[in-house]
Image (cartoon, rainbow, N blue to C red):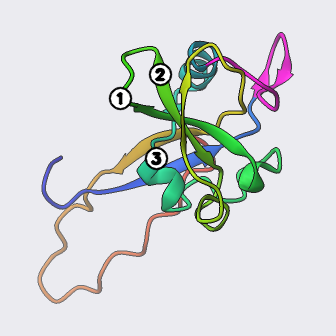
Amino acid sequence: RPQGNTARICAESRLPMRTSGSTCGLWTHDAAAKLCWRAGARVCTMDELLADAALGSGCDLDTESVWAADVCGHGDFYFWSIGGSASYAGHKSAHCLHAAHALPVRCCADETLPPFPPSPPGSPPPPPQAPSPHF
């Protein structure tokens, strides 16, 4: 990442889909990854979920187990499932599940903001950049 840029994670759980209404539902890991990809995002990682990057992002998933992007120790077809928020995950252990299981998904996207152009000496700092309303 270039120096001076800032990165943040944007998350969403309720994405409008042309064929299914929304992403609120149960999906295999592969289907979940495709749904997120179509929205320009990806399945959130365990670290992102534990850091509450997706907290309150829709579908009432803060207290549900959701897919994580992280592969677990049983091979490429097994992924972690964890609570949709850190407070819930703290009361519920993570599970290593086969990708064919059906679970809800939370999608995350990396957003890199460009650095502000250099200001002339003595000028006030630039205003903060407004967050993007979507991925």
Seen at 53% across and 26% down, the residue is 40
Label 3 belongs to which residue?
A: 46
For mark 3, does the 10 Å Cα neighbourhood hold few (<14), some (14 to 19), or many (20 or more) residues?
Answer: many
Q: In which quadrant of the rendered image does the C terminus lie? A: top right
Which mark, by number, is residue 82?
none
Residue 61, given in percent of the width and then of the height, sits at 76, 48
Q: Kindly report the secondary structure that dominates the magenta region of the rendered protein.
A: loop
- Dot 1 corresponds to which residue? 73
- The image position of residue 28, as x and y in percent, is 65, 17
Of the numbered discs 1 and 2, the one sitting upstream in the chain is: 1
Looking at numbered disc 2 in the image, what kind of residue is underneath it?
A: Tyr
Q: Nearer the viewer, residue 81 or 25?
A: 81
Local SS, label 3: helix
**Comparing marks 2 and 3, which lies closer to the viewer?**
2
Name the one closer to the observer, 20 or 91: 91
User: How much space separates mark 1 and mark 3, taking CA atoms?
Assistant: 14 Å
Spatial CA distance of label 1 from label 2 is 7 Å
Q: Which residues are magenta?
A: 16-28
Disc 2 marks which residue? Answer: 78
Is residue 68 on the magenta stretch?
no
Earlier in the chain: of badge 1 and badge 3, it is: 3
- Label 2 and label 3: CA atoms lie apart by 14 Å
